[in-house]
Amino acid sequence: MAPFWSRERLQALIQQGLGDLPLLVVSNREPWIHRHSNGGISAERPASGLVSALEPFAEASGGTWIAHGSGDADRCSVDACDGVAVPPGQPRYRLRRVWLSEAEQEGYYTHLANRALWPLCHVAFVPPHFEEAHWRMYRQVNARFADAVLQEAAGEAALVFLQDYHLALVPRLLRQANPKLLLVQFWHVPWPNRELLRTFPQADALIHGLLGNDLIGFQIPAHARNFLDAADRLVEARVDPDDDQVHQNGHRTHVGAYPISIDFQQWSTVAASDAVTAAMQSWQEQIGVHDPALLGVGMERLDYTKGLTQRLLAVERLLERHPEWHGRFCFVQLLATSRTEIAEYRQLRQELEQITARVNDRWADGGWCPLQLRVEQRELEERLALQRLGRFCVVSSLHDGMNLVAKEFVAARCDGDGVLILSRFAGCALELGGALQVHPYCVEQIAEAMARALSLDPADRRLRMAQMRRQVADHNVFRWGASILADSLRLRDQMQLHPASLQG
Ligand code: G6P
């Protein structure tokens, strides 16, 4: 049965709902990156859940996506207004690039966004680094993004859809400069509790910035509640506990939970393709695994929030406990490098390499290598093939807003088989009841779940997978988009009908 929400249906809603209202999507990461390669220029699409989720919006509206131009050939690919029509070859919308100097990129992105806000929001016990100079750079760059939006909107009304923790100060600047804008922001990462948030010296400015929005979306209700609590206690604002709104100086901001997702049908269809079947064969040869029923996999960005250390230690524990699987069981961890300019990320890689070397020193034998750490970029078909091949996939984030890898694994299992071992601290744990849920700090529990996944009854595996496939098929990314858009448009209509009632 076709899902209720499809790309076409969402796109029809966008076109009909927006009418003449222009749409401006704003994010740090750009949806297309131009790079010099082999004497020419190639356009790459970053493997990002954020980009996949927002692209239907940009395409259907024919609007503009404003983002940091980070590719080495980005500057020679734009017109005089820093814009380029994308996707290349079949243009559907305009990408407007914001240029950042090296110092801006370092202060705003590397430090404030990724060494302060990222660990702060994820509660992963990596201390956030707060420095006044980085905060100044964050403010400066947020003002640059706001200027780009204001230029694009040219004083008129538009729906501005802002993304994530890089741009918390943009909405306030926009509201002050152009009150006709309808401002909506989606916060992709968790929002921490008030006690933790207070450790950030500029917590009040962050909240104040975000309260410039008409609507702020979080992944799960707990993060939305944390935000409401912070707004209530850390800034001068009134929170209406009955209708999830924050009132401040005559403006009100609606706060809600909108669990993001994936294009289930597309992933499922690609996973069932011949290319993926061929890639499965090729993986089997590369890994040297004879029996895929004894294969576990993991794949994500190399990031300390993902619980990778505990996961590899769990493989070690499993092998200590189960000598019967020596010579047969294998765990493959695929990692995409990420934020390598940050020391914690480089240290994590070293730590994972050390654990892998130790495990393989203890048990590798002949052609058998029980733990394989592969830090390499792979094509979509190859990633899906590895997910299809494994008996189980581990997603053991220490804390995660949603985690789309878990949903991708479920979509990839078009064979209806496979076991998901899932951290109870990933946002998607609320939806994926068919997973074997684990405490991600408890190595013992992860090892036990791996053992259980290897010996789970096939009927039980299928039942669990069927529940998860139904959930993700039904709650796909188009439903996410439709729900946040419908609420935004409802707000616009209320504002047009009863502007006075919006006084706080
Ligand atoms: C997370 C964030 C996104 C970010 C992505 C990749 O999912 O929520 O905003 O784009 O990680 O990180 P990067 O720093 O490479 O953009």
Image: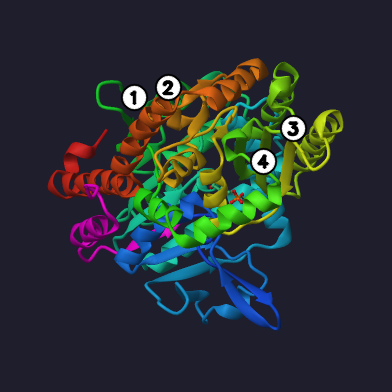
Q: Are marks 1 and 2 in contact (CB under 8 Å)?
A: yes
Q: Nearer the viewer, residue 351 or 502?
A: 351
Q: Is mark 1 within 8 Å of ligand 1?
A: no
Q: Amino acid at mark 4?
A: Gln
The magenta span reads 1-26
Instruction: State the separation of the CA atoms marked 3 and 1.
Output: 59 Å
Instruction: State the separation of the CA atoms marked 3 and 2.
Output: 53 Å
Crowd around label 2: few <14 · some 14–19 · many ≥20 (10 Å): some
Q: Are marks 3 and 1 in contact (CB under 8 Å)?
A: no
Query: Which disc is residue 229 wearing?
Result: 2
Q: Amino acid at mark 2?
A: Asp
**Dot 2: element:** helix
Query: Which disc is residue 239 wearing?
Result: 1
Q: Amino acid at mark 3?
A: Gly
Of labels 3 and 4, earlier in sequence is: 3
The residue that label 4 is drawn on is 333
The residue that label 3 is drawn on is 327
